[in-house]
Image (spheres, helix red, strand yellow):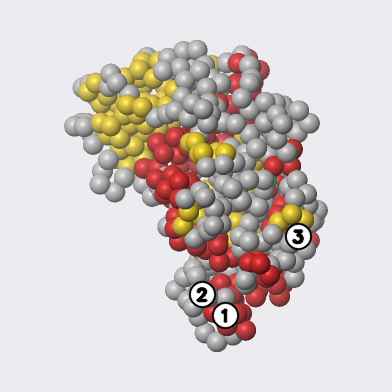
Amino acid sequence: MATLYINETKKKGRISPEIYGHFSEHLGRCIYEGLYVKEDSGIPNKNGMRTDVVEALKELQIPVLRWPGGCFADEYHWKDGIGPREARKKMINTHWGGVVEDNSFGTHEFMELCEQLGCKAYVNGNVGSGSVREMSEWVEYMTFDGVSPMADLRRKNGREKPWKVDFFGVGNEPWGCGGNMTPEYYGNLFRRYQTYIRHYDNAAPIQKICCGANADDVYWTKKLLETCFSAPHPQGGHGYMNGMSLHYYVVPGGWDKKGSAAEFTQEDWYKTLSKALFMDELIRMHGDVMDQYDPKKEIGLMVDEWGDWFDVEPGTNPGFLYQQNTMRDALVAAVTLNIFNRHCDRVKMACIAQTVNVLQSVILTEGEKMLLTPTYHVFHMYKHHQGADLLDSTLTGAGMAGPEAYEVPALQESVSEEADGTVCVTLANLSVADSYPVEVAFMRKQPREVEATVLTGEMCAKNTFEEPDTVKEERLDGVTVTERGLAFAIPACSVVSLRIR
Ligand code: AHR
């Protein structure tokens, strides 16, 4: 018997809704076909945005969307993506498949998408191959309400009022595809570029995101902060930055032989999950360095790229990074989101890579068909954590699962309290083979009502265009009220969500 102790009297901080964010890059079929099909498409759309995909994402209450990259961001020149579409410059997407990018999806289209989704906009600027002027003018174009060359150009292109840009990323992966820089060099560039990201609307200052480390590169974090940390700023954050990013992908077989997304062994299952759990260690490691500079935790750690990265589906363009999604991805999403919730004092945003048709996507499309992946269902089950207060919780009694080399805790949870007092528990069972009886024990709360759902299946279970509902969220039966709380059984290889009133 596993026991989940919940101390509902001990709140540990607010879970930033932006932890449930997404990333959309000009990569493969993410933007084109996935999110955007143009107005004259036979696929139902509103102003070019696929209606089915927008509706499904709205159901997740997607809080923030990052765009246009990724590596693409450091070769993106925003002026190529405005004005009459037929006159927009075409370019080669050198990073992703060498295909022609016709720039038909640009700033206006991205902002339209965010408006339809009702989410915050996270625009990622170009440091690698772009100038300070280019970045500064982009911000002026998007956010200035007065008379200026860029604001006038925006109006000429059909948008009278400025948009709200919530987050602005100053480059992407400068340690790699974004320019192969040292942390000191990038740190100085960051100081310079961010100076010209003006807050045209003082009531809604843009949050500036500095590019943090790749995975466990703590040296980067340390040198970067040494170079560009500054004293607190009256508008929040630390003058130069409001957030520092972290990128971490779970690549079970290593970069040369990542492994199949849909066909794998039990050993692969545990290896993947043990690598996913490393996120906890990463947040601690980078968090410890950040604490030395920013003990009040005013700078957010923004994990703006995370997810599983496997081999592409056989027969697809290797540069498009299109992969299937199984119960293994669902468990990776579940444990990672639990980790983010539990570190909500430091992690203020996270964006899964990438929304549609790429790495760990929540949606896959094929022509007019669309399916929701197991990862989608996890985001749906977890959405009530957005903006809730993290509660103190401890799990005992389930032990470990998996072979010695890749041993993982069998169960892992996070617990929060919504504004109306509803307690939201999300619990992952990482064991492929074993189900567990679980008791939820509160300090004082006496449950009156519970909504319980479960996502479960064989470890390789997935949704296909022929059978789109093989893996789906279902009601969890057999939940009973006990003296201390609740009791139920969690199936092997599953994710459970409980909303307790
Ligand atoms: O998500 C795919 C790529 O992974 C992104 O473009 C890049 O930032 C990262 O290396």
**Would you say the beta carbon of the disc 2 residue lies within 8 angstroms of ligand 1?**
no
211 shown above or below 271: below
Say which label, 1 or 3, has the lower sequence index.
3
Residue furthest to the bottom in view is 147
Residue at horizontal 62 percent and vertical 84 percent from the top: 149
Mark 2 residue type: Arg
Q: Is residue 358 visible?
A: yes
Label 1 crowding class (10 Å Cα cut-off): few <14, some 14-19, many 20+? few
- The quarter of the picture where residue 66 lies is bottom right
In the depicted view, which residue is nearer to us: 273 or 51? 51
Instruction: Tell me if I can see residue 127 in this picture.
Output: no
Q: Is residue 141 toward the left or the right of residue 338 in the image?
A: right
Residue visible at 51% across and 48% down in the picture: 43
Amino acid type, mark 3: Met
Residue with the mark numbered 1:
156
Q: Nearer the viewer, residue 306 or 236?
A: 306
3 or 2: tag closer to the N-terminus:
3
Quadrant of the image occupied by residue 217 = top right
Image coords of residue 283 (percent x, y): 58, 42
Q: Nearer the viewer, residue 293 or 67?
A: 67
| Mark 3 Cα shell of 10 Å, populated few (<14), some (14-19), many (≥20) | some
> Mark number for residue 159?
2
Q: CA distance from mark 1 to mark 3?
A: 24 Å
Return the residue at label 3.
91
Q: Would you say the beta carbon of the disc 3 residue lies within 8 angstroms of ligand 1?
A: no
